[in-house]
Image (cartoon, grey):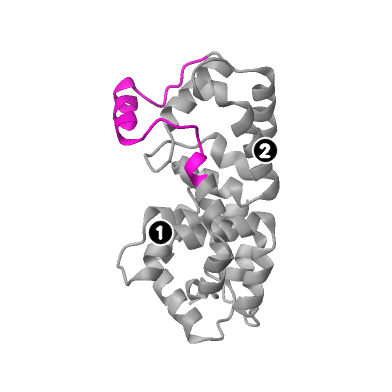
Amino acid sequence: MWLVTAVVALGVAVASATPCEEARMRCAYRIGCGAALNNYMLLCNEVFSEPTTVCPKACEHALIALTSTEEGKELMNCRCENEYCEEAKQRIDICRPQVLKGAANATSSCRLSELICLADAQCAMALSYYRQLCRSVYRGRKCSNKCLNSIEILRKQEKAAALMACHCDGNEEYDCPRMQNNVARLCFHKHSKNHTKGYDRGYNEKHHKRPPHQDLQSAANSAGVTGLLILVCVFLTRFNS
């Protein structure tokens, strides 16, 4: 439901929009939106650094995750008050078509699904417990009762719906097919039908073997106050034109 709302909001102009600085602060001080904003600033850095005609997939995903939050929607409709903000929204406008299309198909990428979950405080907490309690599953050893319980709690989160049905597309920073196969085999005693051995071998050659979500978590933590101050009005008002 929230995906539909986000897509509609992208095309609706707000007459009395909130100033971007005010909207940014509201987002930054909310756990979920703050994390989504940090990821947006980090993953869209390439777009802000120099003019481009292509929106990087990582930036597209970060934008969709940001607009999945209430504060992110307000931020999306904010009103620029300086030239830096105007320049930022002009550059990010290159991502508009992909964001509108991608928001309606969140299950197409586990990377996107994860970012959407991390943008919600409760879902992020459930995902954190899942990471901690299911490490042995990633290693292919066993699925404990604690791990099973964390999976069930994660499944109950609204923003984890896409994560539960997502597809590995190679944009993840971990061995996604391996994790999905191990969860299916060890936790639910069935084999995943989504991946072949050939695909898994190719995926393993592309990605280093590491615990799931490790890189994304450290990347999000590395985006600090300095980055927030540099991109004062990092915004999507342009999406409404």
| Residue at the image position 32 percent from the left and 72 percent from the top | 51
The answer to whether one can see residue 231 in this image is no
In reply to whether residue 233 is colored magenta, the answer given is no
Residue 91 picture quarter: bottom left
Residue 98: mark = 1
Residue 181 horizontal/vertical position (percent)? 46, 22
Residue 30 horizontal/vertical position (percent)? 69, 60
Residue 219: mark = none
Give the CA separation, mark 1 to mark 2. 29 Å
Above/below status of 229 relative to 222 = below
Q: Which residues are magenta?
A: 190-216
Residue 64 horizontal/vertical position (percent)? 51, 56
Residue type at tag 2: Ala
Residue 120 horizontal/vertical position (percent)? 65, 50
In front: 112, or 11?
112
Would you say 20 lies left or right of 43 here? right
Residue linked to disc 2 = 126
Above/below status of 4 relative to 134 = below
In front: 96, or 206?
206
Q: Mark 1 or 2, which is nearer the eye?
A: 2
In reply to whether residue 206 is colored magenta, the answer given is yes
Which of disc 2 and disc 1 is earlier in sequence?
A: 1
Residue found at the very far top of the displayed protein = 189
Residue type at tag 1: Gln
Q: Residues within 10 Å of mark 2 (few under 14, many from 20)?
A: many
| Residue at the image position 37 percent from the left and 33 percent from the top | 208
Above/below status of 45 relative to 3 = below
Dot 2 falls on a residue whose secondary structure is helix
| Residue at the image position 50 percent from the left and 60 percent from the top | 40
